[in-house]
Amino acid sequence: MTGAPVKRGRVRIGTSGWRYAPWRGVFYPQALAQRRELEYASRCFHTIEINGTFYSLQRPQSFREWRDATPDAFVFAVKGSRYLTHLRRLKDIDTPLASFFASGLLALGPKLGPLLWQLPPNFRFDAERLRAFFQRLPRSTAQAARLARRRDVALMKGRSVLAIDQDRPLRHALEVRHESFLVPEFAELLRECDIALVVADTAGKWPFVGDVTADFLYLRLHGDKELYASGYGEDALDAWARRIRTWRRGGLPRDVPRIARSRPPVRPRDVYCYFDNDAKVHAPFDARDLMRRLGG
């Protein structure tokens, strides 16, 4: 008699972005038209992080084209606007946040995955400011649509998406880059607000912690020896595969530091993993190799 199968979360692996000139003729076939690069990449990976949204508001047509170019089961992560995180530093953001959600994210429909919010390196831990930000974040597409109606109407004229096809949950993850966040109070705040802490591998430049603070994990692998440039060797990919297997079963990898005083409940968790070491065309090949290790 066999025992019950071990419950596991779903793992999605991909890259941060897909449009990079050095990838052409190396990862992408030489003759592939640039407009078909997303179509090609989305057949290689489970997910891709949209990072153009970090630099500027995109247009609804772009989101529709990205949606239509990818397979049905594909999922995008969307990086939040730096105008909110880096320029406004999470202060006085009600209207800009509404405009961000009005800009076309909802056109992705079921392909809208987690939202990534990245804080700048000089942003120190401020529990009150973070809590206020977390409370403003929509937790479903219906909430996001209601928020989007409070956009800057003049700025967003003719370039807003306010309707949804179905109400779906929204997940949020936070990436931090200042040592002041390495306190138990930060992890406790994330758990209270159901925000995932990004596990960021940055060649030792910024904090590397792996507290589980939500029902999913969000990994960003920027390079383990040289930021944005170094590839991951066999041993490093084996280690990440082991960690992901542990997280998806609900465990905690022993070789990833944590800051929380308590352990999270043991339950299966989804894992999203994005390679951002794209400077020397390592990201797509590392993502492919990690997928192979995990049976995908």
Image: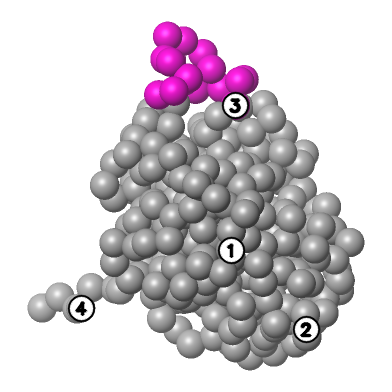
Dot 1 and dot 4 residues touching (CB under 8 Å): no
Dot 2 and dot 4 residues touching (CB under 8 Å): no
Which residue position is annotated with label 2? 127
Residue 63, above or below 86: above
Element under disc 3:
loop
Q: Which mark is residue 20?
A: 3
Task: Tell me the distance, in whole angstroms, between the alpha carbons under discs 3 and 2.
Answer: 37 Å
**Segment colored magenta:** 20-36
Question: Label 2: how many residues lie within 10 Å, few (<14), some (14-19) or many (20+)?
Answer: some
Locate residue 49, reporting x and y percent: 53, 47
Task: Tell me the distance, in whole angstroms, between the alpha carbons under discs 1 and 2.
Answer: 26 Å
Task: Tell me the distance, in whole angstroms, between the alpha carbons under discs 4 and 3.
Answer: 45 Å
Which residue position is annotated with label 1? 151
Dot 3 and dot 2 residues touching (CB under 8 Å): no
Residue 60, above or below 268: above
N-term-proximal mark, 3 vs 2: 3
Locate residue 169, reporting x and y percent: 39, 72
Locate residue 292, reporting x and y percent: 39, 42
Q: Is 17 left or right of 168, judged from the image as shown? A: right
Residue 214, above or below 76: below
Element under disc 4:
loop
Query: What's under tag 1, amino acid-wise?
Result: Arg
Q: Which is closer to the viewer, label 3 or label 1?
A: 1
Which residue position is annotated with label 4? 4
Query: What's under tag 3, amino acid-wise?
Result: Tyr
Question: Label 3: how many residues lie within 10 Å, few (<14), some (14-19) or many (20+)?
Answer: few
The stretch drawn in magenta includes residue 50:
no
Question: Label 1: how many residues lie within 10 Å, few (<14), some (14-19) or many (20+)?
Answer: many
Locate residue 129, reporting x and y percent: 77, 80
Q: Which is closer to the viewer, label 1 or label 4?
A: 1
Q: Is residue 83 visible?
A: yes
